[in-house]
Amino acid sequence: MRWNQPPPNSIQKNRDLLRQADERISRQGRISVFGHLLIFLYVEWLTGFQAIDPIFSYVLGVVMLLVAMLRLYYLVQFESIYPSGPQRWRRVYGWVTLFGAVAWSAFLTLTILLPQYEVPEAFIWIYTAGVCATHIYIFAPYPAMAQWYLRIMLIPAAVASIVLFDLNATSLGVGVLLFYGFMRTTSEQISQQYWAAAENRYQLENELSRVSASEHRLVRKVDNSDRFMTQLMAIIKTPLNGVLGMLSLLSAAKLRQEEHNLVTVASQSANSLAELVEDFDTYLRVKGNMLSGDNKVFNFTRSIENVMEALGPLAHEHNLELTYILSPGTPERVVGNVRQINTLLKQLTNFAINTGETGEVSLKVSTAQERVGVNVSVRFTADLENSLLDDIQMMLRERQGIESLEKIDVNILSLIITASLVQQCGGEINLNILSLDEPRLLQVNVYLPIETSTQSNRAFQPNRHFHGKSASIAGFPAVSKQAIQAELESWGMTVTCQTVDELLSLGDAIYAIDYVLVNIPLHTTEEEQEAIKGLVALTDANGDDDKPRIYFQASAAQQALLRQWIRADLMISKPVSRRTLHRWMLDRKTWRDDLDEHITQRLIGFKVLIAEENHVNGMIAQKILERLGVESELVTSAQEALEKFRQESFDMVWVDQYLSDMTGHELVALLRNEEKQQGTGPVTLLGLTDAKSVSIERNCQAAGMDDVLAKPLNLPLVAETLQRHLV
């Protein structure tokens, strides 16, 4: 067996493993490159270079130096020399190493045989033992090489000690031979352990490679399956929407009562199927990570309000009141994935509505106390089986998928989507059972690690008109009453909570209340209906006078039925968002007559930049602002707006959505970036749109705008908007 070959083993034919072994030798061998030379020079310096012939001493020193330099060259230049011939590198480096061992063995033998050579033999022998122990570890991949190294280093010196026939020297020689036997056995064991570990590692890497390849194929197969299912959902939606449209037309046609009932049942079934398809489509998109995207600044509270208003009709169809509470300190603007968070809020509320039994579904949002982020919780009553509740809690706790459930309930698909989105956002979710009485009171808690934006100081500001005004609310469920009372009180109003009967019993005292807001329950008794009619009659008898201002909050379906005896301008749809309620109540007060006297004084000194391509619209905007005492600058392109923004200071910027050189969203992104570069506070940015809808507002908020103004502009709308953001 050649000394530079590993022991026979099928795994050792692998070139990658042999290269790893040689590379290991090249790293670890550098430590002992100059060891022989340095020890030789140290010993020679102690003896003054006199014990051995100086010429022989110099020759031996030069040989050790050349050997050390050649070894160092092969070790340092491993990456460049090795690829040209691995076997050649092993052979040359091995012979050089053995030649160095021969030189040291000769020096060691001379220190034993020459009695006049008085050197610290104990020091030399300790060094020799250490070098031998080191090299059997370094040359573990090649045990034959390690054994040849031990023979050359130890046997000549041991034989020299024995042939002196001196008791001490002979004892030392025998001890060295015993040490050689021990080191040889140890070298074989180290080599076996090295190759056994290499073989295990090689097999493990192969197994991991196979698993990785199999996993990659599986992921690709799942992706293809998800993509197919998403396309299939889109195909299903098209005819389903057609069916829904035809059913809506049939429901409006003149039908017999029996036919009308059949159409109603068909419409309900089709709507349920459409909701299921929509949820399943969302689940596939979430599972395929199709909602991922870049984080951006957006209006978090506005997103909550939009979700609540959009899901209100669905909650009312399930005979549930829907409300939300924003705790003090809830951030206005946050940094996060808009699509993920909006979908999460919608699906979380959907779950509560679909599984809710009676009463209210209430959503509460607050700032996390001990960590960065927000807490979102939804509370509702539901009649779910104990086994299903246990499965849901385990699924949320262990972050498992829908496949972990023994029984799949269509109603909890929204919760599964929510849990997946929470996991993608890096948050936490759990389900708590607050009451064991049936139907149980449940609460889903979600933590989202989203950061508050530095633009959050542009929060909602109520109009000063409401400060000091009085309000009375009646007929609201517990949580809704708490939410509306806290909101109105935050506007500076004095709020009392009463029943409808108590309002009627006030008599003329009701005229002293500035605003009366009555909630119409989803299901009213005959007594409640009579009480509401009494309030309506009181309002009608009062005509257009300012007091009492009695308004009614009702679902969209209720409003369609109540319009025959309640004026449309007295009703507002529920659930109502903070901004919608604020604007609606402002529209129903008599404050515009003293517009110049009060509002103009508060708006004097503010400056607005208007980016409007249409000169007529721009002129109208400037005239309205001039009427309010606000200074303005008009530009017709995005580039002009950007230059003006850099040169002058503005309190507000109006941006048209369609400019000649770029869109309004692109200009807003440039303006926000300019704020960051200048280190200034965020300026209020308003979008000028041709229409106003929830989707348009949502898109503008996602782009970084604070609010929108729908054209054509009018003085009251502009005045209310300026007061809300500037005063």
Image (cartoon, grey):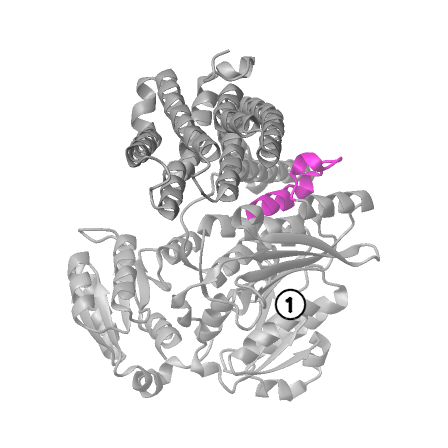
Q: Is residue 22 above or below residue 477?
A: above
Question: In the image shown, does 187 or 651 lie closer to the viewer?
Answer: 187
Question: Taking the image as drawn, is residue 585 in sight?
Answer: yes
Q: Residue 438: name its quadrant.
A: bottom right
For image coordinates 45% across by 33% down, the residue present is 108
Left or right, residue 503 beside residue 657: right
Q: Is residue 661 above or below residue 573?
A: above
For image coordinates 42% across by 64% down, the residue present is 453
Where does residue 615 sit, x and y in percent of width and height? 16, 61
Left or right, residue 493 beside residue 406: left
Q: Residues within 10 Å of mark 1 (few under 14, many from 20)?
A: many
Residue named by callout 1: 480
Q: Residue 602: name its quadrant.
A: bottom left
Identify the residue at the far right of this view. 437
Q: Give the residue type at disc 1.
A: Ser
The magenta stretch spans which residues?
A: 399-421
Q: Is residue 417 magenta?
A: yes
Left or right, residue 432 beside residue 45: right
For image coordinates 35% across by 17% down, the residue present is 88
Where does residue 264 sit, x and y in percent of width and height? 65, 40
